[in-house]
Amino acid sequence: MQETIEILQKEWSFLNDGIQSAGHHYHSFIFSTIRNNAPELRTVILRSVDENSSSIHFHSDIRSKKIVDIEKNNSVGALFYDSSRRIQLRIQGLASVESNNDKTKKVWQSMRNESKLCYMGPFAPSSTMKSFLPNLPHNPLNKINQNDDKLGYSRFCRVKIVIKTIDWLQLHHKGHKRLLFKFEDKVRSKWIAS
Ligand SMILES: Cc1cc2nc3c(=O)[nH]c(=O)nc-3n(C[C@H](O)[C@H](O)[C@H](O)COP(=O)(O)O)c2cc1C
């Protein structure tokens, strides 16, 4: 049991490291939703981790299709792979979307203008264009004004994924190791065949 707790602790620590560094294997992950009974996958950037509430978070545009998916069915997946340690984390969880509250305001205020730009463009995500046009604000980066900022913030949201299970897999030439963690009143773990 001690061994499995230590394994999980280590992964929380790697997830935390992933937030800080763009080169880290856990900096981005594959996020899945369900749309019309079919899986939808996309890459997102890990923005925060909270071990106490067993949750991870990323930022998004509230108008994007993944948000509509979550509103219809909040069962989601998150997939991480650290190729240097040969460890895969296959997460099942429940997602919720936060916008226009104290937390999102604080996060928005701490963001650089470069990161805010993608929320200020004229087109809603996934909308059709006759030909390619950059989905960026009219004003260049150094001329971003309060109206641009306000518009960007109105579209900004934070997606929280509360983890229900983690299927941890470590590839090894002497036999792959695989553990299933279940997050209930407490975290339970069991070894499963790879
Ligand atoms: C490296 C990388 C990082 C990305 N990070 C995010 C992100 O943090 N949040 C996000 O909403 N989209 C992110 N995207 C874009 C999504 O993968 C996706 O194309 C977009 O959000 C539209 O998805 P949807 O139509 O399913 O909502 C990222 C794409 C790449 C390639």
Image (cartoon, rainbow, N blue to C red):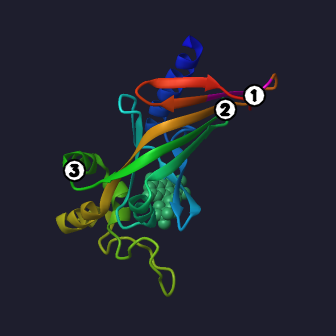
**Helix, strand or loop under label 3:** helix
148 inside magenta stretch: no
**Of the residues under marks 1 and 3, which one precedes in the sequence?**
3
Dot 1 corresponds to which residue?
Answer: 176
Q: Quadrant of the N terminus?
A: top right
Residue 47: percent from the left, percent from the top?
40, 43
What stretch of residues is rendered in magenta? 175-179
| Structural distance between the alpha carbons of marks 1 and 3 | 44 Å
Find residue 194 and report its image quarter: top right
| Residue shown at 58% from the left, 44% from the top | 79
Dot 2 corresponds to which residue?
Answer: 169
Of residues 9 and 73, the one nearer the viewer is 73
Q: Farthest front residue?
A: 185
Dot 3 corresponds to which residue?
Answer: 105
Of residues 145 and 188, the one nearer the viewer is 188
Dot 3: within a 10 Å radius of its alpha carbon, few (fewer than 14), some, or many (20 or more) residues? some
Task: Name the front one of labels 2 and 3.
Answer: 2
Main SS of residues in magenta: strand
| Residue shown at 32% from the left, 56% from the top | 157
Mark 3: amino acid: Lys
Dot 1: within a 10 Å radius of its alpha carbon, few (fewer than 14), some, or many (20 or more) residues? few
**Helix, strand or loop under label 2:** strand
Mark 2: amino acid: Leu
Mark 1: amino acid: His
Residue 10: percent from the left, percent from the top?
53, 23
Q: Is residue 138 toward the left or the right of residue 74 in the image? A: left
Q: Farthest top residue?
A: 2
Find residue 149 and report its image quarter: bottom left
